[in-house]
Image (cartoon, grey):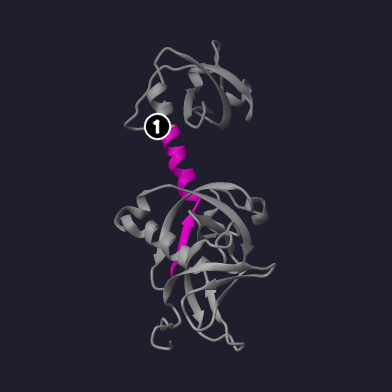
């Protein structure tokens, strides 16, 4: 009988059959002289029933009371990690969906396809984040910026995606600019030679001679910072990024 029993070692992955479910744990027959126990916290999901075959990892061959301590979550985590690393070369070029989970020292813990990832506070936004807790429970688009395979640790950035999206929006705006078209903008800065007007993420220059029909000594005589105005696009130089 002893020889017919499976041999177990910590870290081993085996398949067993659920034989009993209690409030705190799931009892699994793994063909060993003692049944295996999976704590509810070590289940990747609590949706199991008696008779189900589940894949588990051996944590301890003897938990001190003669039982085999098992984990299902570890097996699922390994599979998720392997799936994520399948295209490791292009990993940093991709954008992933993540969910903010908890605030930790220096940043936020999020999950990417079920894998834990650390987002430093400096990588949460293009602006300073005062309350990291506002990202808990939120869906975030992130880029993976660092992978430590030995520790199975991922560092991600939401800021990188925001910058990428802003650049794409800016590029689209440049493509839409047409000489002769009228657009609305907001005066952002006044200088001796003209006014810089934000027309949706791009600053265009209204030369002092084009501020008004009459003679203007300084743009501030006619315009003020924060004022909304309508302007006519006279020239667009995409290469030099000038409007």
In the image, 46 versus 169, the foreground residue is 46
x, y percent for residue 98: 52, 51
Residue at horizontal 42 percent and vertical 62 percent from the top: 79
The answer to whether residue 144 is above or below residue 19 is above
x, y percent for residue 89: 29, 56
In the image, 101 versus 43, the foreground residue is 43
Residue at horizontal 61 percent and vertical 26 percent from the top: 220
x, y percent for residue 143: 44, 51
Residue at horizontal 63 percent and vertical 60 percent from the top: 102
Determine whether, in the image, residue 105 is placed left or right of residue 157.
Answer: right
The answer to whether residue 108 is above or below residue 235 is below
Residue at horizontal 41 percent and vertical 22 percent from the top: 176
Residue 157 highlighted magenta (yes or no): yes
x, y percent for residue 103: 63, 61
**Magenta stretch?**
151-169
In the image, 87 versus 202, the foreground residue is 87
The residue most toward the left is 89
Quarter of the image for residue 144 reads bottom left
Quarter of the image for residue 168 reads top left
Q: Which residue is mark 1?
A: 171
**Res. 109 visible in picture:** yes
State the quadrant of the C terminus.
top left
Kindly state the secondary structure of the residue where label 1 is placed: helix
The residue most toward the front is 1
Quarter of the image for residue 1 reads bottom left
């Amino acid at each position: 009988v002893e020889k017919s029993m499976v041999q177990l070692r910590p870290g081993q992955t085996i398949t067993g059959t659920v034989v009993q479910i209690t409030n705190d744990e799931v009892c699994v027959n793994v063909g060993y002289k003692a049944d295996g126990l999976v704590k509810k916290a070590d289940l990747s999901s609590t949706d199991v029933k008696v008779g189900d075959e589940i894949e588990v990892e051996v944590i301890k061959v003897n938990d001190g009371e003669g039982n085999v301590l098992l984990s299902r979550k570890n097996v699922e985590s390994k599979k998720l990690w392997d799936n994520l690393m399948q295209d490791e070369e292009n990993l940093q070029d991709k954008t992933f969906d993540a969910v903010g989970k908890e605030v930790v020292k220096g940043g936020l813990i999020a999950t990417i396809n079920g894998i834990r990832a650390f987002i430093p506070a400096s990588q949460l936004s293009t602006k300073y984040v005062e309350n990291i807790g506002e990202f808990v429970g939120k869906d975030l688009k992130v880029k993976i910026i660092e992978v430590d395979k030995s520790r199975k640790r991922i560092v991600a950035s939401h800021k990188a995606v925001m910058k990428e999206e802003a650049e794409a929006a800016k590029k689209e705006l440049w493509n839409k600019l047409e000489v002769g078209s009228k657009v609305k903008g907001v005066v952002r800065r006044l200088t001796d030679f003209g006014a810089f007007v934000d027309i949706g993420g791009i600053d265009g220059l209204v030369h002092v001679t084009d501020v008004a029909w009459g003679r203007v000594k300084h743009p501030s005589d006619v315009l003020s910072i924060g004022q909304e105005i309508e302007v006519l696009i006279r020239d667009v130089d995409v290469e030099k990024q000038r409007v």
